[in-house]
Amino acid sequence: MKKRMHGAKPAILMVAVQAAFAGVNVMYKLAANDGMNLRLVVAYRLLFATAFMAPLALFFERKKRPKLTGLVLFQAFCCGLFGGSLGQNLYLESLALTSATYAAAMANLIPAITYIMAVSCGLERVVIGRIEGKAKVLGTLMGIGGAMVLTFYKGFEIRMWSTHVDLLHHHGHQPQPANHHPANRGGHGAHALGSMLAVGSCVCYALWLIIQAKMVERYPCHYSGTALISLFGSIQAVGYALCTERDWSEWKLGWNIRFLTVVYTGLVASGMCVSLIGWCVHKRGPLFASVFSPLMLVLVALAGSFLLDEKLHLGSLLGAGVIVCGLYVVLWGKRREMRRMEQLAIGPCKSTPETDSPIQIVITSHSINSSNDPQSNTRHVAADADDIDIANHESSMVKDDVAEELPDD
């Protein structure tokens, strides 16, 4: 039971991360309803994340922090750019030029883009001929398809509960956000630009996961890494906000929903959640972290129903069901792949100085000549070579899990 819970820990943490991100969307709606410029939210969010994560990094990782290199600093700068300032501002601009529904639908391309990039960079190895490889591809497509159904198909209204809680109506007015451009809506040119910006935000998020996977290999301190990412991202976001918002009265927070929004998004979303994502990417890879993205739409729909008095429709439930099924298929394929890797890596992990010896692969003439079909013999040898190649490629991702699960001598 303990071993199963340990193996399910990354999935549980990623579900918690998506629940926190769903809260970010609700807080964004409340801040925009209050008239706050969302570019300032991004800037304050990263500043609060830096102020929160830096002391944690100094306290918990002061003795095990590796040496900072120029490459690690460059990777942290890129993560702050793609996962922080640029990615979030591109998404907000796409909201202004298109619509929230369209931008949410485009965000569902993140798993597919991450999958393509991870395979291209060698961070994911998918063998289509095996059942686990097919499951990862099928589950990713199911997640994207379910998110599209949830976004575009409405259906009839389903009355399951009614909390009569509407935080937006509680404020009594709904002014337009400061970064809203109503004149740009409706035009074909603006819609095309918004589409490109939405795709750009998806690419940024995928690049962030890929670069972070590379960064944690050289700098496996998640608190310190998150602090560096937030620091670089805050510098970039504050610089961009200063260029676009010169009214200093808009920068004032006060004890209101604006302050609550930047504190929550900074400490929880850009602070702890980024650290958890980095840990999950280190354990399971960038594709594993990205397939949970469509789950946020389900949680946003539920949060909107409870807190914003939004109505649930048939399309929301159907899309949610497909997303959950696709997520389960990917997790099943990933778990099956991890078990295969553990079986191939268990020997080196349990070796001791007394028993440590080179692994010999002996192919006897009887095993090869037992079949009169030379093509069959070739397929068997190729399959063995493929297993060895995959084990060498992904053993760095699983050896930490294997070592933790083995009992102490």
Image (cartoon, rainbow, N blue to C red):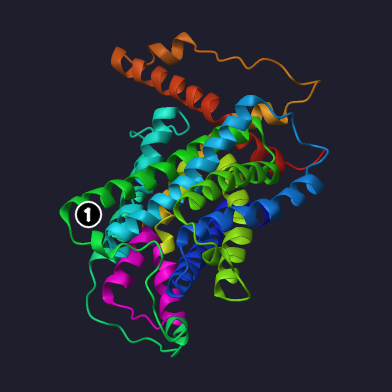
Does residue 322 sit above or below 387 in this rendering? below
Say above or below: 6 vs 349. Answer: below
Local packing at callout 1 (Cα closer than 10 Å; few below 14, some 14-19, many 20+) is some
The percent coordinates of residue 281 (x first, y second) are 55, 43
Residue type pointed to by label 1: His
Report whether 318 appears left or right of 189.
right
Q: Is residue 12 left or right of residue 300?
A: right
Where 356 sits versus 163, above or below?
A: above
Residue 361 appears in which quarter of the rendering? top right
Q: Is residue 228 visible?
A: yes
Residue drawn at point x = 65 percent, y = 28 percent: 347
Residue 187 is covered by the magenta coloring: no
Question: Residue 41: image x %, image y %?
Answer: 52, 60
84 left or right of 188 in image: right
Among the 4 quarters of the image, the one containing residue 310: bottom left
State the residue position of label 1: 191
Closest to the observer, 259 or 102: 259
Helix or strand or loop: what does disc 1 sit on?
helix
The part of the image, by quadrant, that contains residue 258 is bottom right
Is residue 135 visible to us here? no
Magenta segment: 297-325
Q: Position of residue 211 (x, y in %)?
A: 51, 35
